[in-house]
Image (cartoon, rainbow, N blue to C red):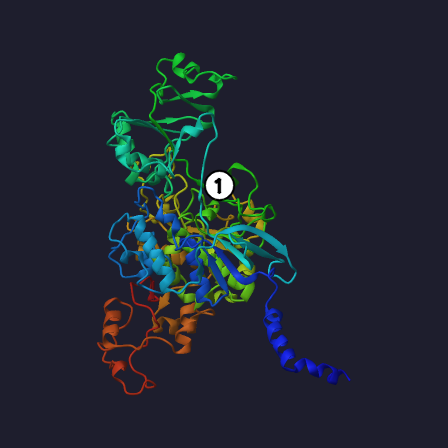
Amino acid sequence: MGLSAAAPLWGPLGLLLAIALHPALSVSPASEPAHRDYCVLGAGPAGLQMAYFLHRAGRDYTVFERAAGPGSFFTRYPRHRKLISINKRYTGKANAEFNLRHDWNSLLSHDPQLLFRHYSSAYFPDASDMVRYLGDFADRLGLQVRYNTTIAHVTLNKDRQAWNGHYFILTDQKGQTFQCSVLLVATGLSVPNQVDFPGSEYMDGYESVSVDPKDFVGQNVLILGRGNSAFETAENILGVTNFIHMLSRSRVRLSWATHYVGDLRAINNGLLDTYQLKSLDGLLESDLTDLAIVKDHKGKFHITLKLYLEAGNQSADAIPLPEDESDNFAMRVPYDRVIRCLGWNFDFSIFSKSLRLSSGGDFSKKYPLVRASYESKGSRGLFILGTASHSVDYRKSAGGFIHGFRYTARAVHRLLEQRHHGVAWPATEHPVTQLASAIIRRINEASGLYQMFSVLADVVLMKENATAFEYLEEFPMQMLAQLETITGRQARHGLFVINMEYGKNFSGPDKDVFYHDRSVGYTEDAWLSNFLHPVIYYYRHLPTEQEVRFRPADWPLPRPTAIHHVVEDFLTDWTAPVGHILPLRRFLENCLDTDLRNFYAESCFLFALTRQKLPPFCQQGYLRTQGLVGTESLRQHGVESGLLQDYAAAGRPWQDSSQQPDDHEPGGYTLVPGPPVRALDSNKEEL
C-alpha cells in the first residue's frame, strides 16, 4: 500500500517538485559558518610567513586581509617611506643561512628568488619595495589569502569536539561567519597611542600630519615622542623650521647603546647633532599627562601645566603660563605646530572580552597578554604573531621585527604540528663524536639564534650513555620546562641549551658602550665577554616550571649544572681551534665524562689493548672498521707531525691502499675520520 500510494509522486509533476526541492535540501543552514582548521588574521609579513609554513605542511587554512593586497601597513607607513631595516646584500659569504643574519627584510621560504635583495639595492629600502615583495611572496607561493575581508568581530563558541575545547567565530564586514579551530593573529600594532590631556585635540598625529617640508617653513615645532617615528618626522623638516623641540617622559635611547633595534637608529638622529652642537633644536623630558596646550588668539600654541588651569570659562589669553612665574621656562616660546609621535597599540576592539586578551594594565594596552610560546594567556589555541607578539622580548631582542618574528612564527608552527598533527619538532640525530662540530656550525651560521638572542635557543638532547644526541633548533627558551610536551621528544639523559647573549653589563642608555678595553680576548675571561657571544648551558635533568619561573635575576634560564661562554669574537667567527673549539670540546667532555677527541687508528688499536673504555670516536669508527683509507700523502703527513712511525725508513714496505684493487686486502694504515691538527701527547691523540 505504501509503495503504490507513493508512486504518483514520481510522475512528471512529482519529479519536477523533487528537482526543485533538491538544492534547498542539500544546502547547509545559513547560520552554519565555513570551517577552517587555521585562520590567520592579517596578510602582513607575519601573517604571510605563517601562511607559508601552513601551506608547505598541507594544512587547511585561510588568511583574512582587509585590504586589496598584502602588506597594507607599508603602503602608508613609515610616513616618510624609508625603512630602518637593513638590506645588506653583500657579506662575502655564500652560506644562505649566514646571510640571513644580515638580511632584515626577507621572509623564510624555499625559493631563493624570494629574498629581499632582489627587490632593492638600497641599504635602507623604500617601503614601496616591501609592498611589492610581499605581493610576490603571496602570489609566487600560492598562499590562500582572502582579500577585501575585514574581520569585525571575534568570539568563542565552546564545543567539546573542537581541538581546544572551543571554536573561534569570526564575523566579517558583510556578516559572513567563519569557524576556526586555531586563530593566529598577525594584525600588528595599528592604533595610534594617544595621551589625553587638556588641549591634546590641537595636536597633529603622525598618522595624518603633512610630510611636505614646505608646510613647515619658518615654523616653531614641538614633537611629542622620543622614538624613531618622532625623529623620522623631525629629520624630514629639520632644514626648514625655525627650531624643533622634542618632549617625552623618558630619555632618548640609542639603539647602538641598548642593542635594541626598536630604539633610536643612527639614520634618524640628526636632531641630536643640532641639539648638542647648539643649533636651536632641543630635547626635553616631562610627564606628558601633567601638561596642557593652550591656543591663543593668533592661533599659536602655548605649553602650560594642568595645575594652572582654573575651572570655568575664560579666554585662552587669561590662562596662567609657567613663564609667568619663571621667566626662563624652557618652552616659553609659542609653537606653530604640535605633532604627536607616540607609537602604536594593538587593536583590541574586534575581540570579545571572553577571549581575555588584555588585563587592562598599561603594558597590556599596547600588547596582548601572551605566554613565551606566543599563545594567549586567556584562550588556548589563540596565538599572537609578528609585531604584536613583542611583549615576550620587549626591549630585549628582535621579536617585534621581521628579522626576528620570521623565526618565532616558525617556532609556533612547529608547536602546532606536534600538538594537533603528532609531528614531532624537527631534529637530527648524530653520534656524540659530532657534538662539538654540530654546535660550532650552528653558532657560526644560524640566523634564528643570532637575531632572537636570549629568546630562541638550540637544544641538544643526549641519548642513553651519551653515545648519540638529537639536535633541535630554535626552541623558545622560556618554555624549556615543557619541552617534552611541545616537541614530542624525550629529555631523559641530560641536555645542552645553546644560546646567544650579550654581556650583562655591556649595554644600556646610561652606559658608555665604547669604553676602553671593552673587548675580551682571552678564553679564561670568556664569561666576561661583552659583545654577542654563544653561551652553552648543561642540565642533567630538564628544569621544572618552578625553576624556570624563579630563575636568578637577569638570567634567561635557571642555574645550570654547568655553563660555558665561548669568548666573544670581533668577526663573530667562532672557529679558532685554540680560542673557541678546544675550550668548547673540553667543556662537553667534562659534562659527559667522555673523550670527544679524534684519533688515528694506531691510537685506537693501542687503547683497545690497554683501556677498559674506549673513546666514542674509536668505538664508532675503528671497532666498526669505518674510517678513511690511508694514502701516501696522509702517511707522510702523519710521519712529519710525529703521529706515525716511519715504517718505510725502517725497511718495511708502505702500500698505498688507494691503489689496491681489493678493499679487503690490508694496505697501509686506516685513519678514523677527522683531519689531523696537532699532537697532544705520546698517544698521538688529536683535537
Quarter occupied by the N terminus: bottom right
In which quadrant of the rendered image does the C terminus lie?
bottom left
Residue positioned most to the right: 1
Residue 158 as seen in the image, left or right of residue 558:
right
Residue 271, quarter of picture = top left
- Residue 1 in sight from this viewpoint: yes
| Residue 534 in view here | no
Give x and y (percent) for residue 540.
53, 57
Please name whichever residue, 495 or 650, is drawn nearer the observer in this view of the structure.
495
What residue is pinned by disc 1?
Answer: 366
* Residue at figure coordinates x 59%, y 61% from the top left: 30
Where's residue 287, x and y in %?
Answer: 45, 27
The single residue placed furthest to the bottom in the displayed view is 661
68 or 378, which lies in front? 68
Q: Quadrant of residue 145?
A: bottom left
- In the image, what residue occupies the spot 62% across and 72% down? 21
Is residue 198 depicted above or below 80 in this figure?
A: above
Percent x, y of residue 579: 32, 53
Residue 677 vs residue 112, the one in the foreground: 112
Q: Amino acid at mark 1?
A: Lys
- Count of residue discs: 1
x and y, in percent, of residue 398 in the image: 40, 48
Q: Residue at x 28, y 37 (%)?
A: 212
Residue closest to the eye, 379 or 97: 379
- 552 vs 111, left or right, is right
Q: Residue at x 58, y 51 (%)?
A: 155
Label 1 neighbour load within 10 Å: few <14, some 14-19, many 20+: many
Mark 1 element type: helix
**Which residue, as the protein is rendered here, is positioned at the far front?**
13
